[in-house]
Image (spheres, rainbow, N blue to C red):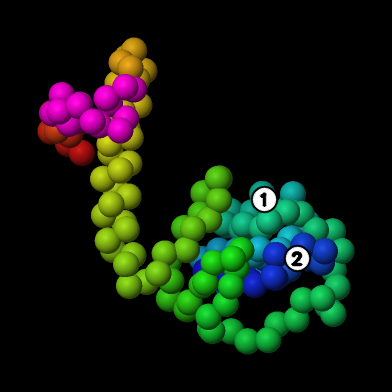
Amino acid sequence: MFVIDSRKDARAASAGSILVSRLMVRGVAGVVTDGGFRDSPEISELPFPAYHHRPSAPTNLTLHQALDINVPIGCGDVAVWPGDVVVGDREGVIVIPANIADEIATEAVEMTAFEDFVTEEVLKGRSVIGLYPPIEQQSKDDFVAWRSASGR
């Protein structure tokens, strides 16, 4: 993952479609900046994860300058260290410190399974009261039974 610290300044683009395309063909896993991208419509059509704060039409090499690589940076007020796990979807990006990534992944799988169960129950007409969060023992028991039946 290529993470760019643009100091949350999108007055000038952090990259454009040519640079992002080059990163993609070079095998980079994705790109994240707390600044902006030029050519954001073109970048959004690439089969490549690319996240930015907002579109930014102008380029200005005196505003953003590459200083170093593979060093700790700040991106969007978050510390990012080489080796950290960066996860993004249509709603945003998170950075997980490498030393707790396995623990977080396990918890995320559990939470996703539980939320899938809750969604199914709500779509059947069940109230969320006592279900989400699961403060009633029946909700916890129903989740265990759902997991067993669904193989999750």
Figure check: 76 above or below 70: above
Q: Is 14 placed left or right of 61 in the picture?
A: left
Amino acid type, residue under disc 2 in the picture: Asp
- Does label 2 or label 1 sit earlier along the sequence? 2
Q: Is residue 126 on the magenta stretch?
A: no
Q: Secondary structure at mark 2?
A: loop
User: How many numbered dots are placed on residues in this image?
Assistant: 2
Q: Which residue is mark 1?
A: 44
Q: Is residue 130 on the magenta stretch?
A: yes
Figure check: 103 above or below 22: above
User: Bounds of the magenta span?
Assistant: 128-143
In percent of width and height, residue 145 lies at 13, 28
How dense is the environment of label 2, judged by Cα within 10 Å: few (below 14), some, or many (20 and up)?
some
Figure check: 52 above or below 89: below
In percent of width and height, residue 102 lies at 28, 63
In percent of width and height, residue 105 lies at 31, 56
Q: Is 132 placed left or right of 150 in the picture?
A: right
In percent of width and height, residue 46 lies at 64, 54
At a point 68% along the width and 56% down the height, the residue shown is 53
Real-space Cα separation, disc 2 to disc 1, in angstroms = 20 Å
Tell me the number on the disc at residue 9.
2
Q: Are marks 2 and 1 in contact (CB under 8 Å)?
A: no
Amino acid type, residue under disc 1 in the picture: Ser
Q: Secondary structure at mark 1?
A: helix
Q: Nearer the viewer, mark 2 or mark 1?
A: 2
Image quadrant for the C terminus?
A: top left
